[in-house]
Each structure stands twice: as structure tokens, then as C-alpha cells.
Image (spheres, rainbow, N blue to C red):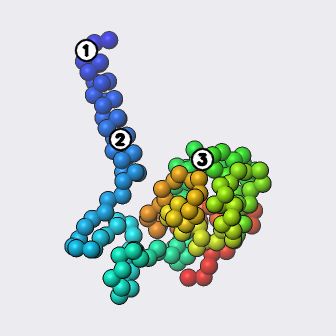
């Protein structure tokens, strides 16, 4: 092998490593931009003016319900593919690190027989509504404190809507979207 080929391969490998590190860093860090004293903007989250100056309240979570009817299932599938290392989506699929997500919408939280849910998830209760899925997919650890899900969440409301619509389609009897 010539020295030119070795140099070219090393250069390409360096580019791949740098781009991979960039993608990983983008996934781990969400920038917070300071505007002025005691005022912050979190990209991808719309702040709501409540008239309060309470910093602890933070931005209001955008609802996905108005976006569901026009959601992009192809994008939802792409977002779901990033979760294939932990979840399966097909009917009768085996649980991995996370449970199978077939027929989740409208089903009880922690409904999958034989899956070892965290105590937090088992005691959370309720059913997976579109609203609950939106809240959980935004910040799983805030929505269900103590969950063993290590996923940081989806900040973009459109990505959450697309993923939720895709998950909703993974059912023999998909639940209708709420009227917007």
C-alpha cells in the first residue's frame, strides 16, 4: 500500500471520528442561551409568558395533540429507529433493555407482562395518553422520577408528535387522535 493511500485513509478516518464526536456531543448537550439577567431561552422549547417572574416554573411544554393529524410517520419511524437498541415496535416483539412498544397508546403504563419495569414506572399508574407520551418523551426522568430509561428526551415538539403518531400506528386498533 502506498504512503498516499495510508495518508488518505488516516485523513478519512479522522474526519469520521470528528463527525461522530460532533454528533454525540450534539445529542448530549442542548445549548442554553443567556439573553439577559434571569432570562434564558432553551432552543426547541417555546416559552409561555405567564406574567410570573418565577424562574423555577420554566417553559411550558408544547402540546402535540394539534400536530398529530398531520404528523409525518416517516420521520416518526426515523426517530423510532434511533430507539431500536432498547425497544422493539413490532407485534409480539421481544423486550430488550426497554419494553416492546406495540399497542402502547391507550394501554396501561407498565402493561407488558414479564418485563421488569422500574419501581417508579410500576407505581406511576394511569394509561399512555397522547398527553402523557408527550410529557414522558420530552423528559422521561422528570415525567417519571426514578425511571430506568436513560434516554434524555426529545426537545423538538414536531419530533415528539411524529414519533407518537408512529407509535400510535403500531396497533391492531390505533386510537384516534384528539380533535384539535
Residue 12 spot, x, y in % from top left: 31, 30
Label 3 and label 2: CA atoms lie apart by: 21 Å
Q: Nearer the viewer, residue 159 or 52?
A: 52
Q: Position of residue 82 (x, y in %)?
A: 52, 49
On the question of residue 138 being in view, the answer is yes
Q: Residue at x 27, y 28 (%)?
A: 11
Instruction: Give SS at disc 2.
Output: helix
Q: Earlier in the sequence, mark 2 or mark 1?
A: 1
Instruction: Say which quarter of the image contains residue 156.
Output: bottom left
User: Which residue: 47% across, 60% down?
Assistant: 154
Nearest to the observer: residue 11 or residue 83: 83
Does residue 105 appear in the picture of this structure? Answer: no
Q: CA distance from mark 1 to mark 3?
A: 42 Å
> Which quarter of the picture shows residue 165?
bottom right
Q: Residue extending furthest top? A: 1
Q: Looking at the picture, how far across and down is residue 150, in whole percent?
A: 53, 51
* Left or right: where 62 falls relative to 99: left
Q: Nearer the viewer, residue 58 or 86?
A: 58
Percent x, y of residue 9: 32, 24
In the displayed structure, 75 sits above or below 65; it is above
- Label 1 crowding class (10 Å Cα cut-off): few <14, some 14-19, many 20+? few
- Give the SS element for disc 3: loop
Q: Label 1: which residue?
A: 3
Identify which residue is drawn at 49% across, 59% down: 153
Q: Where is 19 relative to 59, above or below?
A: above
Report the side of 60 relative to 83 (left or right): left
Q: Which residue is mark 3?
A: 86
* Whole-number angstrom distance, CA of label 2 to CA of label 1: 27 Å
The residue labelled by disc 2 is: 21
Q: Is residue 156 above or below residue 19?
A: below
Of circles 1 and 3, the one toward us is 3
Amino acid at each position: 500500500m502506498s504512503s498516499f493511500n495510508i495518508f488518505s485513509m488516516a485523513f478519512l478516518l479522522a474526519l469520521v471520528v470528528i463527525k461522530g464526536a460532533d454528533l454525540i456531543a450534539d445529542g448530549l448537550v442542548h445549548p442554553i442561551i443567556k439573553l439577559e439577567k434571569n432570562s434564558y431561552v432553551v432552543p426547541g422549547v417555546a416559552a409561555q409568558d405567564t406574567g410570573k417572574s418565577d424562574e423555577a416554573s420554566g417553559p411550558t411544554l408544547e402540546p402535540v395533540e394539534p400536530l398529530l393529524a398531520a404528523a409525518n410517520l416517516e420521520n416518526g419511524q426515523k426517530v423510532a429507529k434511533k430507539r431500536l437498541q432498547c425497544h422493539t415496535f413490532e407485534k409480539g416483539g421481544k423486550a430488550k433493555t426497554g419494553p416492546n412498544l406495540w399497542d402502547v397508546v391507550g394501554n396501561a403504563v407498565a402493561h407488558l407482562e414479564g418485563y421488569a419495569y422500574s419501581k417508579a414506572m410500576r407505581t406511576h399508574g394511569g394509561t399512555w395518553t397522547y398527553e402523557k407520551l408527550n410529557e414522558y418523551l420530552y423528559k422521561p426522568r422528570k415525567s417519571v422520577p426514578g425511571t430506568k430509561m436513560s434516554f434524555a428526551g426529545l426537545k423538538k415538539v414536531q419530533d415528539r408528535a411524529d414519533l407518537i403518531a408512529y407509535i400510535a400506528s403500531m396497533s391492531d386498533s390505533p386510537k384516534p387522535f384528539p380533535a384539535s
